[in-house]
């Protein structure tokens, strides 16, 4: 699959799955706006791409910041937009009784509101151009319950539901909306999570039936698939890529 001449906006592109996605789309010919809260991470993604990627700082919780992100893409590539990949996200590490309202609200602000805003302002641009693809970042945690992840599981379940609603609303506009539900991926974010809660990579690996964690590149490949014409008959899908975690 190639994306020659296409334009993509990727949030969470400063590391992990977001960076892998921005690099893969660029490698396959797309012009990419790599947006992240971490400006240095986004700049590093652009540097690694060696061309075709422009970095941008965005706070996906803030509507004005998201609007500015899309306006930056408009100015870079003449208003063309073909792909929106809403990948930015954060985690939580508590059951409901010990989850503060502040943590709950922030997890939803990034994981759910951030996806909503990316779709709210991305879909009209895709529609004006004749259609395109949105890929949202959900999680296997939105499909099955995981211990000590109350806010995270709830926020990712919201992404799955939002994805399905948007797919129905915009199929007539030529816009396909799907989401990815990864299992545990060996990314910088997961490594930080392990340190915060005192878990180990070995523990996370042990719960995977395949006996290993996923890689950012594997998830990026699935995002590229959903964004491509190879997935032209897919919309409203929640594609689970979890090494078998949800099968047992």
Image (tube, grey):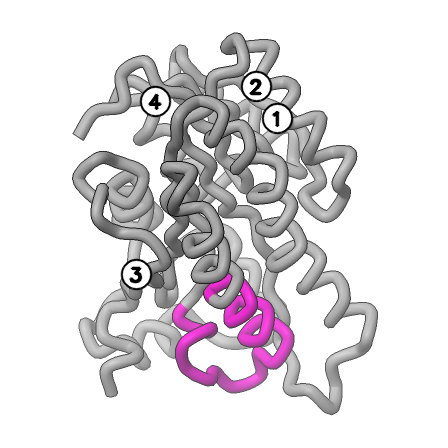
Residue visible at 34% across and 22% down in the picture: 26
For the residue pair 248 and 173, the one nearer the viewer reads as: 173
Reading the image, the residue beneath label 3 is: 239
In this rendering, position of residue 136 left or right of residue 153: left
Location of residue 136 with respect to 161 vertically, above or below: above
**Residue 106's x, y, as percent?**
74, 61
Secondary structure under tag 2 reads helix
> What residue is pinned by disc 1?
70
Q: Which label number is shown at residue 1? A: none
Magenta part of the protein: which range? Answer: 140-160
User: Quick one: label 4, few (<14), some, or many (20+) residues within 10 Å?
Assistant: many
> Disc number at residue 26?
4
The CA span between labels 1 and 3 is 26 Å
| On screen, residue 238 above or below 147 | above
x, y percent for residue 67: 70, 31
Q: How far separated are the C-alphas under marks 4 and 1?
A: 18 Å
Q: Is residue 56 left or right of residue 212?
A: right
- Residue where numbered disc 2 is placed: 73
Query: Residue at 67% across / 43% down in the picture?
Result: 60
- In the rendering, at what x and y percent does residue 232 appear? 22, 42
- Looking at the rendered structure, the secondary structure element under dot 3 is strand
Compute the Cα span from label 2 to label 1. 5 Å
């Amino acid at each position: 699959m190639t994306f020659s001449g296409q334009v993509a906006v990727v949030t969470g592109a400063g590391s992990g799955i977001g960076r892998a996605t921005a690099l893969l789309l660029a490698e396959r010919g797309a012009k990419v706006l790599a947006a992240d809260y971490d400006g240095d991470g986004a700049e590093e993604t652009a540097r690694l791409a060696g061309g075709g990627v422009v970095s941008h700082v965005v706070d996906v919780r803030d509507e004005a910041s998201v609007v500015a992100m899309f306006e930056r893409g408009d100015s870079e590539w003449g208003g063309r937009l073909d792909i929106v990949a809403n990948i930015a996200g954060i985690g939580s590490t508590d059951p409901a009784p010990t989850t503060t309202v502040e943590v709950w609200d922030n997890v939803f602000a990034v994981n759910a509101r951030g996806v909503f805003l990316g779709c709210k302002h991305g879909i009209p641009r895709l529609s004006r151009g004749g259609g395109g693809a949105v890929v949202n970042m959900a999680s296997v945690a939105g499909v099955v319950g995981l211990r000590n992840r109350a806010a995270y599981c709830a926020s990712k379940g919201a992404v799955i539901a939002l994805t399905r609603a948007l797919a129905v609303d915009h199929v007539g506009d030529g816009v396909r909306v799907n989401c990815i539900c990864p299992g545990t991926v060996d990314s910088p974010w997961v490594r930080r999570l392990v340190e915060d809660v005192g878990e180990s990579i070995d523990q996370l690996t042990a719960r995977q039936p395949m006996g290993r964690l996923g890689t950012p590149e594997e998830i990026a490949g699935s995002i590229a698939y959903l964004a491509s014409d190879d997935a032209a008959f897919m919309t409203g899908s929640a594609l689970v890529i979890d090494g078998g975690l949800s099968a047992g």
